[in-house]
Amino acid sequence: MFRFRLERVLQYRRRQLEARTRELAAAQMALHEAVAAATAATGALDRSRQQAAKARRGKLDPPEMARQLAWHDYLAAVERRRLEAVALARAELAGARTRLTQAWRECEVLRRLRERQRREWQQTMDRRERRALDEIGSIRAALAQRRADAITA
């Protein structure tokens, strides 16, 4: 029976590969959410700009103008933070892909080693079986020869 000595290491590497796959999925989800939040922030900022343009056409009193400027500045800061979050999420996604690739390589190396060792073990077993069958055949041939010699003698 074939036994791979590094089977536990291979199982550990497979668990690491699964963990890295889940990590990549989480990073993709985080990026998707960050992009959605940034898109919403950009939309809010655009709407604020349109409202400010409409308000400039009419009369604005100083408190209303100050409120609009403060609101616009707030929305611009929110958009900036959301775009930074998108950049961070993209960097995390790239890191997760790198870690997944590395985990896959480590797992693949052990899987190939196991397959190579299994083939070598199978070849050894096949050679032993052929030798045993050859030995049985030569014993039978020798017995048949003795019988033939005994009959002719």
Image: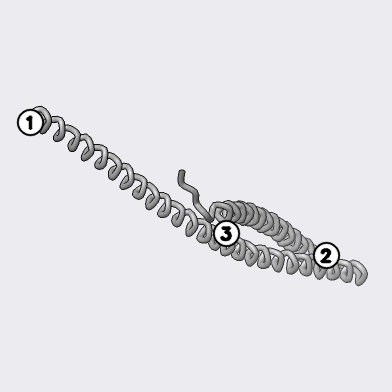
* Dot 3: element: helix
Q: Quadrant of residue 31?
A: bottom right
* Dot 2: element: loop
* Dot 1: element: loop
Query: Image check: 105 left or right of 15?
Result: left
Q: Quadrant of residue 38?
A: bottom right
Q: Give the residue type at disc 2.
A: Gly
Query: Image check: 81 left or right of 103?
Result: right
Q: Residue at x 52, y 56 (%)?
A: 107
Query: Image check: 95 left or right of 127?
Result: right
> How many residues crowd around disc 3 within 10 Å: few (fewer than 14), some, or many (20 or more)?
many
Check disc 3 and report the residue beneath it.
100
Q: Nearer the viewer, residue 144 or 28?
A: 144
Mark closer to the observer (1, 3): 1
- Of all residues, the one furthest to the front in this rendering is 153
Check disc 1 and report the residue beneath it.
153
Q: Residue at x 71, y 62 (%)?
A: 42
- Measured as percent of width and height from the top left, residue 25 is found at 63, 53
Image quarter where the C terminus lies is: top left
Q: Compute the Cα span from label 2 to label 1.
A: 133 Å
Q: Which mark is residue 28?
A: none
